[in-house]
């Protein structure tokens, strides 16, 4: 067990897993980590960090989403077949068919090159793009956990993109913005979606990213204080109206702000929705009751109100 304590992040992973998984499932995750640590051995990432810190971080993303032990174990093992001498049959022998199947699916997706060579004829690039999408959809149909591991893998790669060459940073960021962020959005994993967008934005539009980040940071304390006050006020009003609801407050992420500025042709100080409250209730009628409370507290701006209940987006949102 000595090796466990030497790897950054692994104690937190086991602690998170133990909060919601049975003890025998946590032990499976622990065995997967030990096997991955031994398999990757002295391998290092471009940053110089031990390679095994990457699968640990990927598994942590999934643990934060409360995924099952098979998903966490597959996340820890997801690069073993691709990057070591260990074969899939050995993974299956040690961890069973379910985990091996997820690892195999992630390995196959990792071999997909999403950005076709621009020098090829357009019709060839389109055919390659369609084939890659087909592979992704097949992976989703067979086991959605394959795609979830891949999204977590991409998220950690984006978080650690710094040591790569600028041209490679941009290529990976573009691929992330065009493929992985929309996929996370379609699956309803908005926490991963906005992180992927912000990280991609940082490398694709560095000057705009810095300018918006600076503007946001200057008013961060003020915004955080306002969110706390707004949530408390809103909860009190909902309670007085006899409405049971969960209320969350958050600042809008940077790419969302940039996207609105770009679409509307406005400056930062003309973007009014830099903060967001999310209210979760049980029924549609309750949604509209909540809306009445909202409008009683804060008057809507002309032309800034959208009702996605009566007019859903194409994605179903």
Image (cartoon, rainbow, N blue to C red):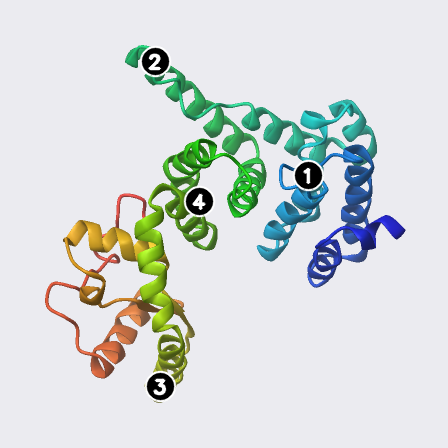
> CB under 8 Å between callouts 1 and 3?
no
Mark 2 Cα shell of 10 Å, populated few (<14), some (14-19), many (≥20): few
**Tag 3 residue:** 233
Q: Secondary structure at mark 2?
A: loop
Name the residue rendered at 69%, 27% in the picture: 83
User: Mark number for residue 184?
Assistant: 4
The one of 84 and 277 positioned closer to us in this rendering:
84
Q: Secondary structure at mark 4?
A: helix
Q: Secondary structure at mark 1?
A: helix
Q: Looking at this view, name the residue that lies furthest to the right.
A: 1
Q: Is residue 303 left or right of residue 63?
A: left
Whichever of labels 2 and 4 marks the residue nearer the N terminus, that label is: 2
Q: Is residue 86 left or right of residue 181?
A: right
Q: CA distance from mark 2 to mark 1?
A: 36 Å
Q: Looking at this view, name the residue that lies furthest to the left.
A: 302
Whichever of labels 3 and 2 marks the residue nearer the N terminus, that label is: 2
Q: CA distance from mark 1 to mark 3?
A: 44 Å
The percent position of residue 20, horizontal first and vertical second, equals 69, 61
Q: How many marks?
A: 4
Q: CA distance from mark 1 to mark 4?
A: 19 Å
**Tag 1 residue:** 74
Mark 3 Cα shell of 10 Å, populated few (<14), some (14-19), many (≥20): few
Mark 1 Cα shell of 10 Å, populated few (<14), some (14-19), many (≥20): many
Select label 2 or label 1 by which is in front: 2
**Tag 2 residue:** 119
Whichever of labels 1 and 3 marks the residue nearer the N terminus, that label is: 1
State which quadrant residue 116 falls in: top left
């Amino acid at each position: 067990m000595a090796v466990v304590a030497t790897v950054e992040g692994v104690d937190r992973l086991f602690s998170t897993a133990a909060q919601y998984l049975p003890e025998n499932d946590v032990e499976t995750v622990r065995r997967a980590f030990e096997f991955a640590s031994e398999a990757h051995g002295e391998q290092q990432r471009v940053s110089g960090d031990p390679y095994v810190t990457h699968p640990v971080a990927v598994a942590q993303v999934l643990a934060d989403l409360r995924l099952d032990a098979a998903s966490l174990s597959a996340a820890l093992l997801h690069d073993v077949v691709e990057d070591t001498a260990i074969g899939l049959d050995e993974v299956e022998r040690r961890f069973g068919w379910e985990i091996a199947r997820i690892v195999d699916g992630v390995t196959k997706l990792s071999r997909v090159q999403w950005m076709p060579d621009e020098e090829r004829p357009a019709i060839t690039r389109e055919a390659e793009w369609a084939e890659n999408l087909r592979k992704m959809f097949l992976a989703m149909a067979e086991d959605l956990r394959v795609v979830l591991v891949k999204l977590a893998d991409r998220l950690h790669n984006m978080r650690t993109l710094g040591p790569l060459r600028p041209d490679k940073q941009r290529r990976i960021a573009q691929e992330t913005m065009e493929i992985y962020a929309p996929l996370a959005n379609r699956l309803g994993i908005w926490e991963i979606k906005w992180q992927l967008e912000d990280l991609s934005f940082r490398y694709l539009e560095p000057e705009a990213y810095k300018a918006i980040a600076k503007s946001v940071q200057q008013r961060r304390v003020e915004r955080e204080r306002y969110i706390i006050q707004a949530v408390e006020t809103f909860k009190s009003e909902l309670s007085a109206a006899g409405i049971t609801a969960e209320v969350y407050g958050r600042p809008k992420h940077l790419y969302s702000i940039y996207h609105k500025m770009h679409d509307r042709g406005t400056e930062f100080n003309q973007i009014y929705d830099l903060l967001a409250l999310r209210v979760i209730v049980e029924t549609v009628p309750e949604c509209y009751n909540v809306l009445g409370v909202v409008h009683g507290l804060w008057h809507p701006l002309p032309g800034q109100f959208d009702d996605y209940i009566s007019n859903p987006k194409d994605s179903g949102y």
